[in-house]
Image: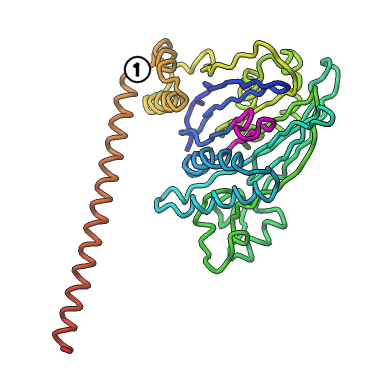
Amino acid sequence: MGLAHPVACKAVYNVAHPGVVAGVGSMQGYRVSMEDTHSLCVPLRRHPNTHLLAVFDGHGGSAAAQFAEREIARNVDLLDVIEEAGVRRVIMEADSRFLAESNQSCKQGACLVMAVVTASAANGEWDVLCVNVGDSRILVGTVPGSAEHEIDCRVMTVDHKPEVSQERERIVNAGGSVVMGRIDRTLAVSRALGDWVFKSNDSLPPDEQKVVSVPEFTRTTVGCGAFLLVACDGIFEAMSSAQVASFVGRDLAETSCADPAMTVARLLDASLRSGSKDNMTCIVACFVDADGVPVERRFVHPEPLPNFEAMRQVDRVAFCRAYLSFAESYGFRHDAEKVLSSHGFDVAHCSTLRKRRHKGMQMRERAVHGLTIAACIVAVIAVIMAFTRLTAIYPT
């Protein structure tokens, strides 16, 4: 179940470095929570001529995506040489660590898409290593010289879907099934981080499970006048890759690549209008020298917000709570409260309900923890009593 009205506010920002400017934006949309994260390292600390752009699209919760955000870029940066074998090892080792965590979060998952962009000293171009685990995408396009020019679009990734023959074969060999495009009628992607339920066959190695975290790689080069787009599948839910590339290319041309983050914000709005119901996160990088690019983090909210008087009470509270939660996760809670209040929403009431809900969840977690401990104690006592009886019947 999703929200009756989308959370269409956005968190956006730019980063700039000689020869490249990149913008990122995120929107929660109709989902009740935000499960996407990203890494935008321009440049990497130990590799000053290399940039990393990554989007992590969580499912079943945000834990796997947040774990990937903390681990992947940091460990890629620690590689002496960033090449396919090393990146593959970083991703699969991160997956193993996440699955080893002794909590319910290991049942959650995340798709990963990443572009590692390195300056080429030879000809002023950029070498791009594209990395994909799941169904997010990387596009390479051109910024047109005028509105009449065609926009070249290359899709650098292939969606890892269960119905793809290579993926289906592995799933079936691992004891799974593919029904209506889903593994065991449940999961709609065949490669991801996490998803312990689909990786728990102890008789199989990690790269032969129903779901694997093995990345696929492609390479390309880009030059001045090109743009690189890294995005989760929510962007493409209702827009084709060609439509997305055309929208971005023309918007960048109109704005002279002066603010890629706002280009992303407008793309998110276009995707939402086209019918996307998913979380959306996108990074757009332009290979130009741009002066005066705004780099501060910004909270962009749509006008107008839904008419709160026409909303059912339950929808109004759910929307308000989701809006505040999204904004708070990016450091914009105060801005969100001002926006909601100006449109007539009872922010104090929503906040009170949110605190009560959080307190209730904590109390339930404590109760479950207490019952688990009690059950263990009872089991130990039962074993001791059984041993005592056996000792009495069969004395040594």
Amino acid type at mark 1: Asp
53 displayed left or right of 197: right
Asked whether, in this view, residue 253 is left or right of residue 394, the answer is right
- Relative to 241, does residue 186 appear above or below in the rendering? below
Percent x, y of residue 98: 49, 50
Q: In the structure shown, which secondary structural element does the residue marked by tag 1 occupy? A: loop
Identify residue for label 1: 346
Q: Is residue 390 above or below residue 199?
A: below
Q: Quadrant of residue 166?
A: bottom right
- Identified at 72% across, 46% down, the residue is 217
Determine if the magenta segment contains residue 151: no
Q: Position of residue 360 (x, y in %)?
A: 27, 38
Looking at the picture, how far across and down is residue 268, in whole percent? 61, 25
Q: Please indicate, yes or no, whether residue 145 appears anywhere in the rendered image.
A: yes
Residue 247 can be seen, yes or no: no
Specify start and end residues of the magenta stretch as a single range.
Answer: 40-56
Q: Residue at x 60, y 36 (%)?
A: 55
